[in-house]
Image: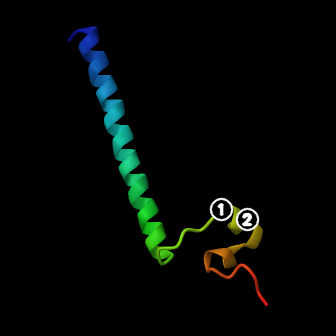
Amino acid sequence: MSKEMMAVLVFGLIAAVAIVMLVRERRGIAERKAARGGREVDVGSLIAFGSAAGQGEKTHD
């Protein structure tokens, strides 16, 4: 096997792994969003307001 063919195979393997990881991450994001009832939760809100931000209750009157 030539060096060029080996380089093509290695590049193809890296690209395939990257695509699989992207698909898995997108699927994980969709599952987490579905678990929250379809709502997006801002990370900054979680830091400032704690878990109440994830429940949609940023302020308590």
Q: Which residue is mark 2?
A: 47
* Quadrant in the picture for residue 58: bottom right
User: Could you tell me the amino acid type at mark 2?
Assistant: Ile
* Quadrant in the picture for residue 11: top left
Element type at mark 1: helix
Badge 2 local density, few (<14 within 10 Å), some, or many (20+)? few
Q: How is the image coloured?
A: rainbow
User: Could you tell me the amino acid type at mark 1?
Assistant: Val
Count of picture labels? 2
Q: Of 25 and 53, which appears nearest the observer?
A: 53
Whether 5 is drawn above or below 27: the answer is: above
Image location (x, y in percent) of residue 40: 55, 68
Q: Quadrant of the N terminus?
A: top left
* Quadrant in the picture for residue 60: bottom right
**Residue at position x 28%, y 9% in the image:** 3
Image location (x, y in percent) of residue 26: 41, 55
Q: Which residue is mark 1?
A: 43
Question: How much space separates mark 1 and mark 2, taking CA atoms?
Answer: 6 Å
**Residue at position x 43%, y 60% in the image:** 28
Pointers 1 and 2 in contact (C-beta within 8 Å): yes
Q: Of 58 and 10, which appears nearest the observer?
A: 58
Residue 43 placement, left or right of 3: right
Spot the residue most to the right.
61
Badge 1 local density, few (<14 within 10 Å), some, or many (20+)? few
**Residue at position x 48%, y 78% in the image:** 37
**Residue at position x 24%, y 15% in the image:** 5
Q: Quadrant of the C terminus?
A: bottom right
Image location (x, y in percent) of residue 19: 35, 42
